[in-house]
Amino acid sequence: MAVEFFSAVDKVDGPTGKGQIASTLPAWYFEKNIRDLEDDIRQTKRRLDAGQIAHNKEVQIKVELRRKEKKLASLKDAKPVVDDKTRDVFAKVHDEMSESLSAAMYTREEEKRGTVNPARLADLMSKPSIKVSGKVAEIAVSNGLPVSKDGKMSMTDLSIIWKSAGRILEKETNTEVLRRDR
């Protein structure tokens, strides 16, 4: 059940090699960007059809329009399509991750009182400190996210999987909904 969240559209050639992931979250995760690109394409086509583009700019605009249409198609193709069985596994894993993340987060009351330990919070965010199941570890490894030998992940890396799985399941993806009041 190795579902890859990151595709070719998310990868660039970087200083340490080819195919490095360019962003923390996959491009298809950002639905607003996709909607904005769709709107931009629609508006440009409308302007071209209405003759509102200067003739000397028309060729350049059409080339740019084709580039944007190709980018939109690659963004839409990049989102993993999961079958019902995989969706069920994702739902179970998402619930498991929700519990783990919620338990690891400081409460709203602790934040309000100012009793959050910044050093401990930094460790939670950056060091493997949250125990994960084999399925979560499998998903993490298939997406290039680190899992320690003892099956732990950092809160930041675990939240990447939680958000991506949540977007696929069409659930809330803001980790603040997991924060307990007390």
Image (spheres, rainbow, N blue to C red):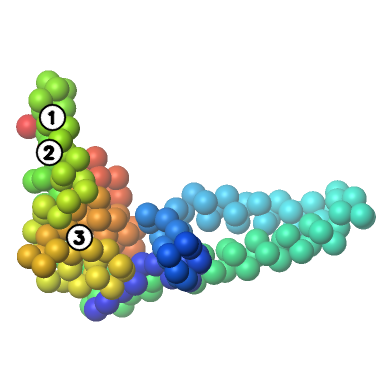
Is mark 2 in CB contact (under 8 Å) with mark 1? yes
2 or 1: mark nearer the eye: 2
Tell me what residue is drawn at x 27 percent, y 77 percent: 2
Question: Of label 3 and label 1, which has the lower sequence position?
Answer: 3
Q: Amino acid at mark 3?
A: His
Circle 1 SS class: loop
Is mark 3 in CB contact (under 8 Å) with mark 1? no
Q: CA distance from mark 2 to mark 3?
A: 25 Å
Residue designated by label 1 = 116
Tell me what residue is drawn at x 32 percent, y 59 percent: 164
Residue designated by label 2 = 120
The percent coordinates of residue 129 (x first, y second) are 11, 52
Residue designated by label 3 = 94
3 or 1: mark nearer the eye: 1
Q: Amino acid at mark 2?
A: Arg
Is mark 2 in CB contact (under 8 Å) with mark 3? no
Q: CA distance from mark 2 to mark 1?
A: 8 Å
Is residue 151 in view? Answer: yes
Q: Is residue 39 above or below residue 105?
A: below
Tell me what residue is drawn at x 14 percent, y 41 percent: 105
